[in-house]
Image (cartoon, grey):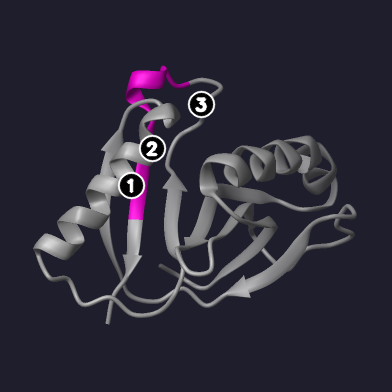
Amino acid sequence: WPETHYVFVEKMGPFMATAPQAWQQVHRQVPSIAEKNKITGYFSLYKMEPKTYRAGVSLAEAPVELPEGLAYEKFAGGKYSRLTYTGPYSGLPGASGRAWAIAAEKKIPLRDGFTIENYANDPKITPEEQLVTEILFPTE
């Protein structure tokens, strides 16, 4: 995963509650972000301990005049193992759980870092059953 300019909302706590809240906040701010910045993608970062969820957008360069309530980080990226899920976002909790199980079964050496969910296509124009999400685990 390349180094990325990342603008996000961070929430702590159970993902089933915090993820929707974070995305609602980001989506409300997207028009304001896009006024002065080029959005290049949408992805989330999460850690299991402590339960940390970040919903956000990648930008072509460092942000200009961000709306209040958003954070910015130049995300370092690094080496990741990828599993791909195709289907509606409502299936992501199960897909993510299965991806973690596969990583454990295959004894993939993981490093401390954020797991990435990269939303590869646009849900506004892509049918739900064709949505592609890449689940990326930080590997050694």
Residue extent of the magenta highlight: 126-135
The Cα–Cα distance between marks 3 and 1, rounded to whole angstroms, is 19 Å
Checking the image for residue 92, the label placed there is 2
Q: Secondary structure at mark 3?
A: loop
Q: Of discs 3 and 2, which sits in the foreground?
A: 2
Quadrant in the picture for the N terminus: bottom left
Mark 3: few/some/many CA within 10 Å (<14, 14-19, 20+): some
In this picture, residue 106 sits left or right of residue 132 = left
Residue at 45% across / 70% down in the picture? 2
Mark 2: few/some/many CA within 10 Å (<14, 14-19, 20+): some
Q: Secondary structure at mark 2?
A: helix
Residue in front for this viewpoint, 101 or 86: 101
Q: Quadrant for residue 116, please give it.
A: bottom left
The spot of residue 99 in percent (x, y) is 25, 51
Q: Secondary structure at mark 1?
A: helix
Checking the image for residue 123, the label placed there is 3
N-term-proximal mark, 3 vs 1? 1
Residue marked by disc 1: 96
